[in-house]
Image: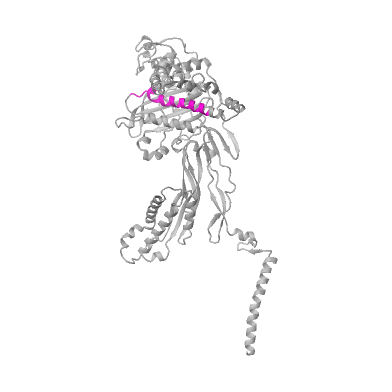
Amino acid sequence: MKPGERIRIRCVFGLLGAVPVFLAGWLGYLQVLQAGELPRGDGSTLPLVAATAAGQGARTENVPQPRGTIVDRSGNVLAIDREVYEVRARITVPRDARKSVQKYLTYFAELANELSAAMAADPAMADRAVVREVERKRLLQLFSKEFNTGALAALVKVPDAPLPEKQPLVADVRLAGQVDELAVIEALRRTDARSSVAMDFLHSFSRAYPERDLTYGVVGHVDTEWKSDPATGRRWIETIGVCGLESFDDLDPSKAISRPFRLDGAGRPYFLSPLKDTPQPTVVHSTVDIDLQRIAERELTAQCEEKIADANAKLPVWGALVLVEIATGDVLAGASWHRDMALRPERRQGLAKSSAWTPYQNQFEPGSIVKPLVFAYALEAGLVDWEHQYDCTPGCSTYHERIGALGRRRPVRDDHACGLLTPHEIIVNSSNIGASYIGLGLEREQWRDYMGFYGFGTTLGLGLPHEFRGGTNPKSFDPSTPIRSFRANSAISFSFGYEMQVTAFQIARAYLRLFRGAGSELRLCRGIEADGAWRAAPVSPVGAKLSPHVIDAVRAAMVDVVSADEHATGSHMHRRMLKELGIDLHGVVAGKTGTAVSQVGVPGRGKMEMRNASFVGFLPVEQPRWLAVCVLQKDDHASFYGGSYAAPPAVRLLLQTQSLEERRLFRQESQVTPVGQDRAMQSAPGIQAEAGGLQRQLR
């Protein structure tokens, strides 16, 4: 070996030996002199510790905060959040699939097969093969829309036909929404491993309603949809269409929450911990009893659809049935029915969400169900002698003196001829002439006070959106309206429930005030659990009360309405229940029927004549505990009486309410000690005297 070659070899090996020395020195410099830090371009430093390496795979996703839960008075879930994912994919056609039309279409056919298999991956799913085929067809239609694959069908017959120049090669596709099955999500993540498909799983919550068909009106609903800003790319969830209890502010999520996760070596995410800093979901405890709500819906639907099989029969336009606990004002049930729901079942969900026909929205002229309210107010004011007999004969001298002399254009008529009647008998016979005599005893300011005392024309205070307050004709209490005109029209009409608009909830509140006093309000929420604390909703305070003798007098008259007396307006329903159930309702259920004919404006159809059938009932008759209000409205000229149509579902609901309460009490008694039994009995006032009452009637 020549000397020059030895020198070159020594230099090479010397340089190679210097490399590890340099690396050792560099590592020492980093670990010792720089204390384990690296400078960044922005002037900050990056610590060279294990936590930094671990942080390289750490990620955080923001997810919407859950709305919370709505439960009934027994804790049964009425609305709850369900964690779901919206699955979006960025599909990039691979190079090999771009070589020809045949390969292009084959790629999307295989992708549709793979994704449809993932969508049907839930092992608990019935008919998975059917679901898979449905999903495959849906995905092929989706690809046809996004990648215009349908336009390539004619080119398939040409061997190795090239793709058109402007054929889409990349697109963002929404594959599915509200995916909540873990098996489906995992199957889709495996599809995400394809180099040509990049998936995004957008976390969200979907609202679930276990008793959806029963709770549209009272519990309400909420729709959500994703929104995005094209300029910034920011995405968020917007809530739309909120109504019922779902509209409560406590259920409105204030901010998003975060969930940390990690990326594995292949960049695939996996979660390590639950949602971070998650507040306890709010729980709204409603007053609704789902068992009673189910009964109310069933009875109302059965009455409204009684003649649905008759092609010539015309069903009511809408119906409402409300049940209230008098001691607290709690709304135990609030059922709704609409004709379109029965005649167009395929649109049931859409109609239920878009139609304003809940018991706090549908307005009607109440008719004679207000007579007990008018008589109670007049008796309390000292304007009625309960023993006096009023001549209610049509065209009698008293009629001409008190009503005819006022120049009223429309005569006051009764459904059947009446003679001398006491106020008690006027209510039982539902005499409009007799009610007019009583109403004319009230001055205009007293009528204004009457409306305020019972809450007509004022909000229910339940915080429900789109509530209709109803009220009277603006001219009724206009100072420019002459007193004579007021007496001839409004005072007489108010006496038997005309010239005013109310809702079923407002009638329930009015009778609540009759029994409990002014200021009594309905209650739809018993309390709220928020942030681990219980906030009870107070029972409304009670103001001025009617005298006990006034309430007893009106209550006794309503007891006789539901009797075998042929002139009592509840006699038809009394006979029907005696025949169908074998129960003599006299002394078991009390109530008042109502019938009204109104002119209602219908969009696109002008003024139409509507007939309102209504009934207010309570039970037990001696110490009323439950109050029911039923209203049905029909748009034809056929007879439509409250005693025949509105009374039966309300009475059945009241009877089943008492029966259910007795069964629950007996069930409770069999499961507790004597001490617990005493406590249970004390917690239900008046129940000792009521238990067994219906059983005795049934025997």
Q: How many marks?
A: 0
Whether residue 640 appears in magenta in the rendering, the answer is yes
Residue in the foreground of this view, choosing between 130 and 112:
130
Query: Residue 335: x, y in percent?
Result: 44, 31
Whether residue 643 appears in magenta in the rendering, the answer is yes
Q: Quadrant of the N terminus?
A: bottom right
Q: Single out the residue that lies furthest toward the right.
A: 32
What secondary structure do most residues of the magenta stretch adopt? helix
Q: Single out the residue that lies furthest toward the left.
A: 312
Residue 507 visible (yes or no): no
Location of residue 266 with respect to 202 vertically, above or below: below
For the magenta stretch, what is the residue range? 639-664
- Residue 50 falls in which quadrant of the image? bottom right
Name the residue located 67 percent from the left edge and 71 percent from the top edge: 24
Name the residue located 48 percent from the left edge and 22 percent from the top edge: 695
Residue in the foreground of this view, choosing between 403 and 220:
220
Query: Residue 455: x, y in percent?
Result: 49, 25
Residue 55 visible (yes or no): yes
Name the residue located 39 percent from the left edge and 65 percent from the top edge: 98
Residue 619 horizontal side relative to residue 635, left or right = right
Location of residue 549 with respect to 138 vertically, above or below: above
Q: Single out the residue that lies furthest toward the bottom.
A: 2
Query: Residue 640: x, y in percent?
Result: 35, 24
Location of residue 165 with respect to 435 vertically, above or below: below
The colour scheme used here is one colour
Query: Residue 84: x, y in percent?
Result: 49, 48
